[in-house]
Image (cartoon, rainbow, N blue to C red):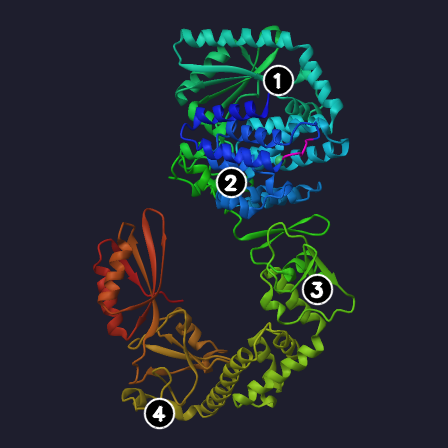
Amino acid sequence: MTTQEQFQKLVDTILTYNPGADIPQIRAAFEFAEQSHQGQKRKSGEPYIIHPLAVAQIVAEELRLDSESIQAALLHDCIEDTPATYDQLAKQFSPTIADLVEGVSKLTRIQYATKEDEQMENLRKMLIAMSKDIRVILIKISDRLHNMRTMEYQSLDKQKQKSLETMEIYAPISHRLGMQRIKWELEDLSLKYLDPVGYNEIVSKLDAKRQEYDEFMKKTQAQIDQRLNELEIKHIIYGRMKHPYSIYRKMFSQNKSLDEIFDLFAFRVIVDTVGDCYNVLGVIHDIYKPILGRFKDYIGTPKPNGYQSLHTTVMGADGIPFEVQIRTQEMHEIAEYGVAAHWKYKQSGQGAGTEGKYEWVRRLLENQEGADAEDYIRSLKVDMFADEVFVFTPNGDVQNLPAGATPIDFAYAIHSAVGNHMTGAKVNNRIVTFDHVLQNGDIVEILTSKSAKGPSRDWMKIAKSNEARSKIRQWFKKEKREENIANGRASFEAELKHCGILMKDVTDPENLPSLLKKVSFGSLDEMYAAIGYGGFSAQKAVARMQGELQRIAKQHQTEKAAAAALAAPAEKPAEQAPRSAEPKRIKSEQGIIVEGLDNCLVKFSKCCTPVPGDEIIGFITRGYGVSVHRADCPNASPERRNAPDQKDRWIKVSWGSDTNENYPTSLEVVCKDRANLLLDISAALSTTNTFVLGIQSRSTTDEFAMIRLDIRIRDAQHLKTVMNKLNQISGVLKVNRPAG
Ligand code: MN
């Protein structure tokens, strides 16, 4: 076929699926490419233009892409291999076409070396991320397919290297994009060069039995076809043989001979409805004997990538087993055409892969929902890795970093020691600054020196990854301990001075343990070191210590006063009655007057949360002043009050006249569980001007619910109003004040 004939064939193919294609522009691209590649030959000796034409043919025939993609396919080697430039293509064709060609060239420039699985996965992601426009990767795959088809003219080394790359990178990407036929062909072609002996063994065995196999398939297909027609089940049926690479994998992974492979032959039956899928299954199992354990219902339980079908294996004539796959047209298109079909049939919920591997395809698909058919491929921007960047080490390992990452992030991702000894960096062989932003596909090299000073504090700001930042912080923490302690101590002392606190109060052995506990450090040096490397601030340290010092001071006062009061118990009973009968305006703490004590630390017990108006009693705690309980609190029961070891510590307290604060208290509402109950409760609280601190509800057995309200209350009167209001709500059985 002459190149002109080949071009005409391409045009004919395009017009079958896209009658509106821009043929003059496509011809212009063909002529431009032919001109640019003038004089270049392929390894086969043919003129080079054969290759871009064949790639365009694949793009049209297999993928049915738009006019821009066809032009880009024709021009795909122009920037890389001819004097033509990006600007020239942008001007003569369009910036989009120039971008596509540039994108394909970039992928071509990437160097691969075979690596462990995780590395390969990163490489695949890198390719996708670099493609930006999905058409770039589709053209690149078509390019690779044609190169694999014509690999026989290459050197042995090149054959192996390209085949490995195809097997590890391009076949899996084709699979992910749902292009099964291309994937099979890529795998078979790769196998042919990777293991010629194994490949030929399979192919020659298949060839030897070709006639026998063909007859078997024809006969079987006719049998099934006839039965389905008799039952008037509308269907399409066709058979295929397993392709060589999947036979190869089965033979080797399961150590089986060709004859032992159950699903060498497979038939596919496509029907209209899910119901018919199961009807066909019944028919097949009726004609042939099913092989136990081989039935799989991927309709009921789709595969993670959304694949659906019924699979069964049965025993055919002459004891030859074969597989049957049964699916609807919709399931079929999704299985065959992947990406594109997913758009056509929005699968509500199904195919929402739980497997991380397919996650990015799913995201890609979701972003496209509702797009217009013709714009579909065009608008498939590959932005699923927008927040990641993939770069190479000089050895060809791929590092996956956050977008915007710098050489510092890269160095620390390799190893802390590399980061800590870094003196400079090269990107694509050029020296760059530490804040240079890395791009997909960059080759990054870190220059290190044993005598490097180590990271600077600025690096923390430049680094994008948490990993790098935390490793830098780690370094300052460890390497510079002495310096950190000195720096930390200096800023701590300055802050103390600023707040008017004496160092001797901090170091006082009576205070130090509880102060350290407040800041959660084992020693002052530890705290200084943390302040020094930036893990803790002097302001925070001093603020917390200041609070603690005040508390300690107050506690000393209370204890002293309590001791004094208890030292003179005889005078107490006489004075007690009149004092509580007509409370003097004594300076009180939180509205509480403690008998005989001025200005002492008071806290309200959490068990019964007293509010003004409640009858109350105080208990002198060790360390925290006086704790106030309701008189009816179980924790203040008469037994406790009279216990010999506690008797002296119970003290009379009363409400002062300055109880204008709000007191936190809790209520428990027992009610019948119903809709809008919480709504009614909050309405009751808001009409009584009650501030809510928290609501927890839990269902109990028998449709009852227990709701705990934490609220602020002014006094007993307010509390009574609230409880009344709550009691009036329909469904409320009881309102309790919890205690004990
Ligand atoms: Mn090419």
Q: Is mark 3 within 8 Å of ligand 1?
A: no
Q: Amino acid at mark 2?
A: Ile
Check disc 2 and report the residue beneath it. Answer: 134
Sequence-first disc among 2 and 4: 2
* Residues shaded magenta: 38-42
Give how far across and how far down residue 229 sits, in percent: 42, 8
Give how far across and how far down residue 172 sits, in percent: 60, 35
Check disc 1 and report the residue beneath it. Answer: 264
Mark 3 lies on a secondary structure that is: strand
Mark 1 lies on a secondary structure that is: loop
Check disc 4 and report the residue beneath it. Answer: 574
Q: Amino acid at mark 3?
A: Gly
**Is most of the magenta stretch helix, strand or loop?**
loop
Q: Quadrant of residue 584?
A: bottom left
Check disc 3 and report the residue beneath it. Answer: 424
Query: 391 and 507: which one is in front?
Result: 391
Query: 715 and 153: which one is in front?
Result: 153
668 relative to 36, above or below = below
Judged by depth in the image, the label closer to the viewer, 4 or 3, is 3
- The answer for how far apart the CA atoms under marks 1 and 2 are is 34 Å
- The answer for how far apart the CA atoms under marks 1 and 4 are is 106 Å
Query: 663 and 76: which one is in front?
Result: 76
Sequence-first disc among 3 and 2: 2
